[in-house]
Amino acid sequence: MSGIYVHIPFCKSKCTYCDFASYPKEIGKADLYFACLYKEIKSRAESLKGYVFDTVYFGGGTPSFVHEKYIIGALRQIKNFYTLSDDCEITLEVNPGTLSAEKVKAYKKIGVNRFSVGLQSADDGMLKRLNRIHNRQDFLLATDLLKGENLSVDVMIGLENQTENDVKATIDLAEQGGAKHISCYALKPEEGTPMFGKYLNGDLPSEDETADLYDFARKYLEEKGYHRYEVSNFAKDGFKSRHNLNYWNRGEYVGFGVAASSFIGERRFTNTEKIDEYTACILRGRVAEIFTENIEGDEREFEFIMLNLRKDEGFTFSEFTKRFNVDFTEKYKEKIKRVQKYIDVTSEGIKIKPEYIYVQNTIIIYFMD
Ligand code: SF4
């Protein structure tokens, strides 16, 4: 399985915790950016002949902020130059406050069949402090436009003064909006963002408090029929994100646009985060990559273990042998012993015990040399 990612680096304003490649002041460059994006999409096609892509994901930034003509153009370009599977999952990230009936109609017409909505919190005061552009009413208006669609909703935990009741209210609102899938991420204040100051001041919940909020969210989501399948992702039956599963399965993907990463044929490469540098490279007929590495030897196995153990189902030994021609239980015998308290091992495969999934990072480390 393989996927396509397209990065849209424009937002209406900047959220206080965000260090993603999104540039509210650069929207005037949209025409040039998309012209270059289409060029990049075309230019990589030759090297990806023979691939059938099962997913396309428009992320950002806020893809629904830009005029729909740009998204239509990008998807047309992808369809012109790449082979997509018949039931290809095509996701578009949207933010409340940037959507309209015309946009939704246009997205659906071109083939978008899954929408991911950034809610984050049901508390208007909290949304304001995060500098989100929407309130809870905007969320309901947006989900009304998307009624009946395959909908994912983003929810945040670890927010300032957040209580279990706040988390409950946010999950309730996501469900009310029709979410079939909920991503529940812990706020990670990145250095250089306004929120980082709050983190340094100790205004945010501690790691333990956030872990408790996560635990509460996990149980509440489960009660509502959203089953966890990855550390931060929960879905009703039949609504797991195929695009993200491909990442955790260590499948191949190609990324277009600024800051987009690709993983093809054991080579991982990432485009520049700067719009001007990106467009200058593409206009000169060059690639915009600033980082590239070839993954070799045991590093491939470690990546596979690390990514697959994020999933509730872990991985099977036969999958491991198929990929690497290695007997996992034999090669990792000693390492398995060191973490046996945290994992379930059967004759078929290995997974982290459900109660330890949230701290999987500290367990996975043991599989490194
Ligand atoms: S909407 Fe998303 S990408 Fe844009 S600034 Fe906020 S968090 Fe960042």
Image (spheres, helix red, strand yellow):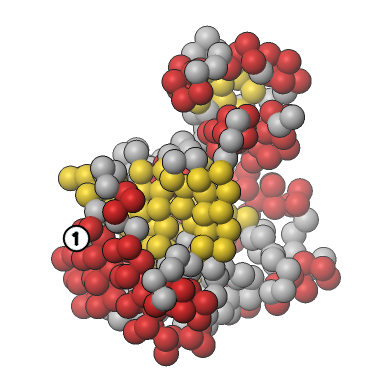
Q: Nearer the viewer, residue 13 or 72?
A: 72
Q: Is residue 122 visible?
A: no
Observer-nearest residue: 97 or 335? Answer: 335
Q: Is residue 31 left or right of residue 123?
A: left
Q: Which residue is mark 1?
A: 80
Residue that appears at 69% across and 28% down: 367
Residue 205, relative to residue 343: is it above or below?
below
Position above or below: 358 against 260: above
Task: Give the percent coordinates (x, y) of residue 155.
Answer: 52, 59
Q: Position of residue 85 (x, y in %)?
A: 22, 45
Quarter of the rendering containing residue 330: top right
Give the amino acid at mark 1: Asn
Q: Residues within 10 Å of mark 1 (few under 14, many from 20)?
A: few
| Residue drawn at (60%, 70%) of the image | 18
Q: Nearer the viewer, residue 75 or 280?
A: 280
Asked if 355 appears above or below 260 in the picture, the reply is above
Q: Is residue 309 above or below residue 179?
A: above
Q: In what element is the residue under mark 1?
A: helix
